[in-house]
């Protein structure tokens, strides 16, 4: 009988709901200090998770949850880039 695998659960920083890791998008601070979206969930670096909606990204930025989780302030041009990448997905 095959084993049942556990589904990793992560919390969205915007809406604060726990969901399966594959349903969320990872925002990562790379070892070089760059902040970018990680749609694969496998890039190296410190990660934080948000729902695939611009509203959750806005809430995570406004509530300072994203910068706190990534342990780095998020510049305005990076926020614009993240919003653009999220909309183009």
Image: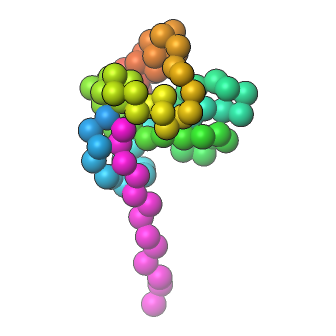
Q: Residue furthest bottom?
A: 1
Identify the residue at image location x=48%, y=28%. 67
- Residue 48 in percent (x, y) is at 48, 40
Image quarter of the C terminus: top left
Find out whether residue 83 is within the magenta segment.
no
Is 59 on the left or on the right of 49, as rendered?
left
Pick the quarter of the image with the N terminus: bottom left
Write the start and end of the magenta stretch as one range: 1-13
Looking at the image, residue 53 lies above or below residue 21: above
Camera-side residue of 1 and 61: 61
Q: Tell me if residue 89 comes above or below residue 14 in the rendering.
A: above
Residue that lies at the very extreme toward the right in this rendered image: 32
Horizontal arrangement in the rendering, residue 40 relative to residue 63 (left or right): right
Up-down relation of residue 42 to residue 54 (above or below): below
Residue 40 visible, this angle: no
Please state which of residues 25 and 34 is positioned toward the viewer in this rendering: 34
Residue 5 in the image: x percent, y percent?
Answer: 46, 73
Looking at this view, name the residue that lies furthest to the top: 77
The image shows residue 59, relative to residue 5, as above or below, that is: above
Count how many numbered circles sit on residues in the image.
Answer: 0
Q: Residue at x 64, y 24 (%)?
A: 34
């Amino acid at each position: 009988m095959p084993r049942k695998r556990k589904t990793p659960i992560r919390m969205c920083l915007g809406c604060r709901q726990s969901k399966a890791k594959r349903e969320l998008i990872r925002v990562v601070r790379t070892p070089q200090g760059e902040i970018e979206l990680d749609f694969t969930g496998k890039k190296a670096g410190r990660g934080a998770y948000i729902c695939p909606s611009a509203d959750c990204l806005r809430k995570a930025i406004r509530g300072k949850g994203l910068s706190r989780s990534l342990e780095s302030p998020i510049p305005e041009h990076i926020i614009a880039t993240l919003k653009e990448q999220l909309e183009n997905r």
